[in-house]
Amino acid sequence: MAHWEMIGTLVYKLTKDATIDQIKGTPFEAHYVNHGKGLYLHDAAGAPWTATFFNVKGDPVADLHEDMAAEEKARATYEWLINISDDPGVTDTLRFLRQREIVHFQRFGEALRIIQDDMNCKKYY
């Protein structure tokens, strides 16, 4: 959730003083038409965020793999955003968030190894 807070703050700061003329004809126009300058969680194509993005199976191995995949997808998204950013402040924020995704991926990987080692020590019938 902290990532959303940072991205929301970033978007707010970038758009809070934008005039209607600055918004017209930009990718932000569709967002503005539906939500004004309010923060609304959606992807770049406008698909809204839903709780279905949290995939939980109830199995620690499956769930950790899902967590790791989510971290890698977020890292890739930050990479692509960095590629198109021409604002040094935005780019720095995105690099910070990308690095957090990398660290989260590593920590989930460590947790997965611990779980798998524990499972290998137990007999399952």
Image (cartoon, rainbow, N blue to C red):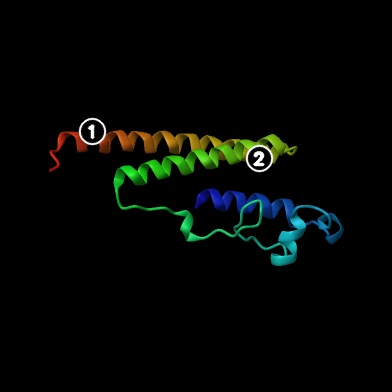
Looking at the rendered structure, the secondary structure element under dot 2 is helix
Along the horizontal axis of the image, is 80 left or right of 23?
A: left
Q: In the displayed orientation, state which residue is furthest to the front.
A: 125
- Name the residue at 19% across, 34% down: 120
Amino acid under disc 1: Asp
- Name the residue at 61% across, 49% down: 7
- Name the residue at 30% across, 33% down: 113
- Name the residue at 69% across, 65% down: 35
Along the horizontal axis of the image, is 42 left or right of 89?
A: left
Q: In the depicted view, which residue is nearer to us: 4 or 52?
A: 52
Mark number displayed over residue 117: 1
User: Residue 17, how many percent across, how many down?
Assistant: 78, 57
Q: In which quarter of the image is residue 16?
A: bottom right
Task: Using a 10 Å C-alpha cutoff, classify the residue at mark 1 as few (fewer than 14 neighbours), some (14 to 19) or many (20 or more).
Answer: few
Looking at the rendered structure, the secondary structure element under dot 1 is helix
Which quadrant of the figure contains the C terminus? top left
Counting residues from the start of the chain, the first of labels 2 and 1 encountered is 2
User: Residue 25, how many percent across, how many down?
Assistant: 83, 55
Amino acid under disc 2: Leu
Is the residue 2 above or below the residue 84 in the image? below
Q: Mark 2 points at which residue?
A: 81
